[in-house]
Image (spheres, grey):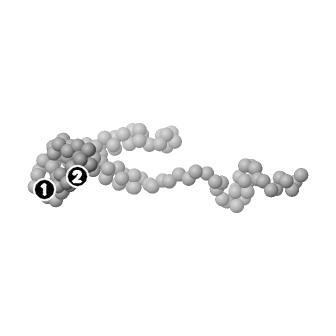
Amino acid sequence: MDTLQTHGEGPQDQRHRCQQERVRPLAPQQVHAGARTGWAFALGTLALTSLGIYLGRVDRLNSWDVLADPTSLLTTLGDRLGSPLDDGRFVGLVSGMAGALVLAYAVLHALGWLRPYDERR
């Protein structure tokens, strides 16, 4: 009877063996990129979002222009990003919108609304 039990390990046996060998049992792995990477991603995303808001509100471009008229979109984007200081309104609106979005994100983060549930306790 003992020989039959050694062929197949139960969950308790696997955990005990893993503890002895200092190996973690098989489990889904969580990937944590770190706070700096998270903030860099958030800031980049918010900057691109503010650029998109400007293109939509001022230049009257829409999301379907990516497929319907990509040359017009690329021309407008090239004009705006090629010489951004020529149009003070562009710099002011994009930086102001980015600042407002970053401020809102930071406030929500500070209040704990953007943290995983486990970290809120």
Q: Which picture quadrant has residue 60?
A: top left
Q: Which residue is mark 1?
A: 85
Pinpoint residue 65: horizontal percent, then vertical percent: 23, 46
Q: Is mark 1 in CB contact (under 8 Å) with mark 2?
A: no
Choose between 111 and 81: the one closer to the eye: 81
Pinpoint residue 120: horizontal percent, then vertical percent: 48, 40
Which residue extends farthest front?
68
Q: Which mark is residue 23?
A: none
Q: Secondary structure at mark 2?
A: helix
Choose between 116 and 10: the one closer to the eye: 10
Q: Earlier in the sequence, mark 1 or mark 2?
A: 2
Residue 77 in view in this figure = no
Which residue extends farthest bottom?
21
Q: Is residue 7 left or right of residue 97?
A: right
Residue 112 in view in this figure = yes
Pinpoint residue 26: horizontal percent, then vertical percent: 64, 54
Q: Is residue 60 left or right of residue 106?
A: left
- Tell me what residue is drawn at x 34 percent, y 44 percent: 106
- Tell me what residue is drawn at x 45 percent, y 55 percent: 33
Q: Secondary structure at mark 1?
A: helix
Tag 2: residue type?
Pro
36 to 112, vertically: above or below = below
- Tell me what residue is drawn at x 35 percent, y 49 percent: 42
Question: What's the CA distance linking mark 1 and mark 2?
Answer: 24 Å
Which residue extends farthest right?
1
Choose between 56 and 87: the one closer to the eye: 56
Q: Which picture quadrant has residue 113?
A: top left
Choose between 60 and 81: the one closer to the eye: 60
Q: Which residue is mark 2?
A: 70
- Tell me what residue is drawn at x 86 percent, y 56 percent: 3
Pinpoint residue 67: horizontal percent, then vertical percent: 26, 49
Q: Is residue 2 left or right of residue 28?
A: right
